[in-house]
Image (spheres, helix red, strand yellow):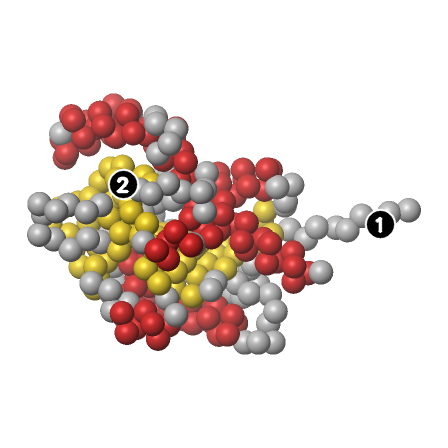
Amino acid sequence: MMKLVEKKPVRVAILDLYEGAANQGMRCIREILNQYGEANFLDMEWDEFDVRQKSEVPDNSYDIYISSGGPGSPLESKGSPWENAYFHWLNQVEAWNNNPGNQQKKYVFFICHSYQLVCRHYRLANVSKRRSTAFGVFPIHLLNEGKEEIVFDGLNDPFYAVDSRDYQVTTPNHNRLKQMGASVLCIEKERPHVPLERAIMGIRFNEYMIGTQFHPEADAIGMSMYLQREDKKNDVIAAYGADKWASMIEQLNDPDKILWTYSHVLPNFLNQAVEHLQTVEV
C-alpha cells in the first residue's frame, strides 16, 4: 500500500505596517496566499502582526515572511520602539539564514514602506521625501540583474505596477550593495526631460530577501472597484485630476499590466520559498 506523505502546512507571517490605516494591501496579501494555496494544493496558514501599533513581530517559527506597505514617513520612526522591534526581528532572521546548521532558510518579501525602511537600515541608498506623491500605474524598467531575477520571471520590460508613495529610494550605495551581495533589480521610467534621479524600484538584499517599492500585491479588479467608489473617485480627482483617475481605471483593466504583475511577482516568490521548503523536508 502506498503511504501518503502528509504535507505540512506552509506557515507565513504577515508583518502589518499599516498602523491601523484603511488599506487594500492586507486584503490583497491574504487573497494571494489563499489563491496560491488552492492552485498548488497547499495548506497555507498565516498570522498577522501589528508592528506599528503594538510593536508585534513574529518569531523564527515561520517559513515565509511578507512585510507590508504603510502610511507616513520611513524616516521619522528611527529609534522608535516598534522600529527597534522590527529590526531586531530582521537581525534574527538574518542570523538564522547565516547559520549553516539551519538547512531550512527563511524567505522574506518587503513591500513599499518596509522596503524603504530596510534600504535605510542597510544604508544601501538614499531614502527621501518626493517633491510630489507618486500615485497610479507606472512602467518599471528591468536592469540586467532584474532580467535574471527568478521572482521577476515572466515579467515584460517594462512591466507595470501600482505605485503609491510620498518617499523614494535613490542614489544606490554601490560599495554597500557589493559588500552585502545585494543587487538593484529595476528602476522607475526614464524621463529625459526631468533632471531628477530615477527611483530604485526593487532590490534583492540577499539570497533569501527581496523588496519592491511598488505594490506587487495590488489586484486589478479590487483596485478598480475601490477607485470607482464615489468617495475614492472624488478624492483622486480632487488630488490628481480627472485624467489621472480615468487613466488608472483604464490601466487597471488592461490584462497585460497590473493583473500580469499580480499573477507573477508574489507567486514567483512563494514558488521559490515553497520549493526550498520541499527540498529541505526530503
Q: Amino acid type of disc 1?
A: Lys
The residue under label 2 is 139
Taking the spot 65% from the left edge, 56% from the top edge, the residue there is: 278
Q: Earlier in the sequence, mark 2 or mark 1?
A: 1
- Residue 192: x %, y % from top left: 12, 47
Taking the spot 13% from the left edge, 29% from the top edge, the residue there is: 241
Q: Is residue 280 left or right of residue 194?
A: right
Which quadrant of the structure image shows residue 99? bottom right
Q: Amino acid type of disc 2?
A: Pro
Against 58, residue 24 (above or below) is above
Residue at the limit of the structure toward the right, as seen here: 1
The front one of 166 and 184 is 184
The local secondary structure at tag 1 comes to loop
The residue under label 1 is 3
The front one of 114 and 230 is 114
Q: Is residue 123 left or right of residue 277?
A: left
Taking the spot 56% from the left edge, 58% from the top edge, the residue there is: 63
